[in-house]
Amino acid sequence: MELSSVPTDAELAAWAMQIAADMQHHKLMLATAESCTGGWIAKTLTDLPGSSAWFDAGVVTYSYDAKAALLGVSRTTLERYGAVSEQTALEMVSGAIDRLGAGVAVAVTGIAGPTGGTPDKPVGTVWIGWQRRGAAPRATRFLFGGDREAVRRQTVAAALIGIRETLAD
């Protein structure tokens, strides 16, 4: 999945409408577990009228404590790999499936900036995880450019595109 530019609100809304149709077609409920996007994915999806028919829940977990308490992310994972890691994204999305009861979940964790980056994890590093109940979770690393707004907007778009791919699997 590749984004050619920073998506507009209209593009995000169009992807959300496609997800709404897909979720209803599959008769599944969706959950989000967000960190760097601060609930933007859930907002984009629930901006649609009738979203309660297919959107179940969303949680925003910035701290290690919240990731552990609300999503069941292991303290060992957080201490060994950090919040912005494949392992954490996988545990976040699995936790969303297990704890929120949805049929499909997406989880995002990253460094939107402008500070917080390191040589190993520069600003713009984002891990996104997706899972459909009964299937193994998967996660992908992205390195988005631009300012905080651009990184977050691209993260929302990649998360939405990945939800559609998860439903097509």
Image (tube, helix red, strand yellow):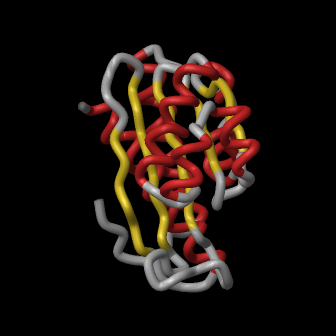
| Viewport quadrant of the C terminus | top left
Q: 121 or 20, which lies in front?
A: 121
Q: 77 or 160, which lies in front?
A: 77
| Viewport quadrant of the N terminus | bottom left
**Image position of 15 (left or right of 162):** right
- Residue 5 image position (x, y, % from top left): 42, 77
- Residue 29 image position (x, y, % from top left): 54, 21
The image quarter containing residue 114 is bottom right
Rendered view: 124 above or below 51: below
**x 36%, y 34%: residue:** 137
**Residue 157 in sight in this render:** no
Q: 114 or 153, which lies in front?
A: 114
Q: 42 or 64, which lies in front?
A: 64
- Residue 112 image position (x, y, % from top left): 61, 73
- Residue 38 image position (x, y, % from top left): 71, 55
Q: How many labels does the image show?
A: 0
**Image position of 96 (left or right of 24):** right
Rendered view: 26 above or below 1: above
**x 68%, y 29%: residue:** 57
**Residue 60 in sight in this render:** yes
**x 51%, y 76%: residue:** 124
**x 55%, y 80%: residue:** 123
**Image position of 43 (left or right of 24):** right
